[in-house]
Image (tube, helix red, strand yellow):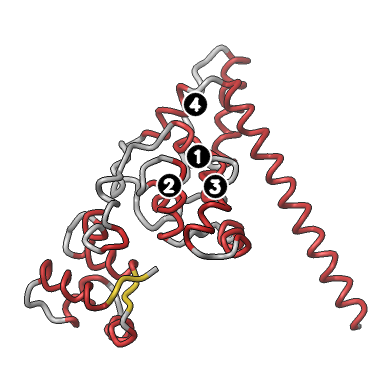
Amino acid sequence: MTVPSKNFQQWLNSVAGAASHSAVCRAAGIKRSTLAQQLVRGRVSVGTVAAVSRSLHLPVVQSLSAFEKYRDLAAGVLPPTDAELLSQVSDTDLLQEILNRSAAADNGTAAREVSLAPIPHRVSVRTWLDAVGPADLRQRAARAAGIAPQNLSAQVTANRLAPELAIHCARIAGVGLANGLVVTGFLSSDEAGWMPHAREELLRRTPSSTLLALSAERMEALGKTMKRLEADAEADQSVWENLG
């Protein structure tokens, strides 16, 4: 997603003062040629805005809110719901927590704490969308963004979601507007205002029955994915055999 280069230039002048583009790019870790190309095309990526903002130690959410398309982003920041937090616990960590509790119950000891994998995990976008709902969320988000549902599905399968789409989804679901940017890895949880260790604390206090039900849903989804991949692999193999 992009913002108009004119608006970017105005924002950059307001936050970086007289600093040259070369100096800004060096500090932000961006190639000077990349920024130059974006400016010539009239559209600057939001990734560039975020990189420059971080290099200047500015809140990324506030920086994005300076642009019309993201005007309500800062005002729409809300803490993640419990469902959102659990959606950002990976399948492996979820199963490990269940196993640790089971072993602790057998041994009469305290369960070992799981060191959670960082966000995003392997299917963080899909699990977040499933957690925030409603059932027609993807279709409504695709319509709001003016894209085909298949394009959105392709992004979800690749564990990606364009920033504008992530915000559309959050707005439709009624959750914090920045939360979808966390699950895609565009923002860190700290940048979106999530409390430190919120996932770990929630995981520890969630009943085992809830974790088991959630893991069953995850395993069912994983099974469907594996079947699809196996079918695709068989089809590819069949094509090669026919060619060969």
Which label sits in the foreground, 3 or 4? 3
Residues at marks 1 and 3 touching, judged by CB atoms closer than 8 Å = yes
Under circle 3, the secondary element is: helix
Q: Residues within 10 Å of mark 1 (few under 14, many from 20)?
A: some
> Mark 2: which secondary structure?
helix
Above or below, 236 against 150 in this view is below
Inter-mark Cα distance, 3 to 4: 37 Å
Quarter the C terminus occupies: bottom right
Look at label 3 and name its amino acid. Answer: Leu
User: Where in the figure is residue 41, as x and y percent of width and height?
Assistant: 34, 85
Sequence-wise, which precedes: disc 2 or disc 3? 3
C-beta proximity under 8 Å, tags 3 and 4: no
Q: Which residue is mark 3?
A: 137
Which of these two is toward me, 157 or 138? 138
Alpha-carbon neighbours of circle 3 within 10 Å: few (<14), some, or many (≥20)?
some
Task: Please state which amino acid type lies under the numbered disc 1.
Answer: Val
**Pointer 1: what residue?**
132
Report the residue marked by disc 2: 170
Where residue 103 appears, as percent x and y from the top left, is 61, 22
**Residue type, mark 4 in image:** Arg
